[in-house]
Image: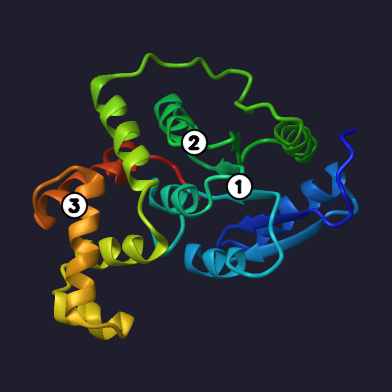
Amino acid sequence: MTTVSDRARFLIIDDHPLFREALHSAVQMAYPDVDTVEARSIAEAIELLAGAKPFDLALLDLSMPDVHGFEGLLQLRTRYPRLPVVIVSGYEEPKIISEALSYGAAGFIPKSARKSDLAAAIRSVMDGAVYVPENYEGQKPDPDSTDRADMVQRLAKLTPQQLRVLQMLRQGMLNKQIAYELQVGETTVKAHVSEILRKLNVYSRTQAVIEVSKLDNAELFRDQAGF
C-alpha cells in the first residue's frame, strides 16, 4: 500500500449524502489515517480549498447543482492546477471519460464501481497513475476536443478574480452589476474584462461567453443516466 502522510487531506465533492459516505468509506479502506473533508457544491469546495491547509486529492462528481457539464472540473483545474482531481461519476460514456481526461482529470472512476475497486483506483492515482475503467478504450481526439483543450489552457491563465468576472459575464451581468457584486469600481471591472479577452484570445465579451460555453459539453450529458 502507498504510504501517505497522516497530514494528507482528501476532498470529496458530491451533493448526495449517501455517495459522500460511500466515497469516505472507500478512502478509509485505501488510507485509514487520511483526513477526509466533504463539500456539497463547487462553491463550497473552492471555499475549502482556499483555506490554510492544502489538499492532496479531490474526488469530484460531474453532476453538481451549481455547475453544468465539465464546468466544475474546469474551475478546479484553473484555480488549483497542482491539485489532482479524480472524477467519480454516474456518467460512463467513453466520450465523457475522454473529455474529462483532456481537461486534466487525474482519473475517472464510475460510481457503479465496488468499494474495493474505488479504493484501488484512489491508491492508483496517489501512486501517480491516471486511472480509467478497465473496459475504457481511448478515443482519437477530434477537432472540437482539440479546440476545447486549447481553451482550457487559456483559461488556466486567468486569475481567480478574472474567473469570477468571466462567470458573471456568462450570466449576462453588466459591468455596473459586476462592480457591485465584487465591490470594486467599474474601471477595475473593465480592466479585468480586457485581460480576459486578451488571455482567451477573443475580441469581444460575447465571443468569450460563446467560446467558454462550448466547454460545458451539455450535448454529452443529455439523456445520460447521471447521479
User: Which residue is denoted by mark 2 in the rendering?
Assistant: 104
Q: Position of residue 76 (x, y in %)?
A: 49, 52
Q: Position of residue 70 (x, y in %)?
A: 40, 46
In-image side of 62 versus 5 (left or right): left
- Count of number-bearing discs: 3
Secondary element at tag 3:
helix
User: Which residue is denoted by mark 3 in the rendering?
Assistant: 197
In-image side of 32 versus 85 (left or right): right
Label 3 to label 2, Cα distance in Å?
Answer: 23 Å
Closer to the camera in the image, 107 or 177: 177
Q: Tell me which amino acid carries mark 2.
A: Gly
Indicate which disc residue 23 carries: none
Secondary element at tag 1:
loop
How many C-alpha atoms fall within 10 Å of the one at disc 2: few (<14), some, or many (≥20)? Answer: many
Residue 96 visible: yes
Identified at 69% across, 56% down, the residue is 55
Of the residues under marks 1 and 3, which one precedes in the sequence? 1
Residue 222 visible: no
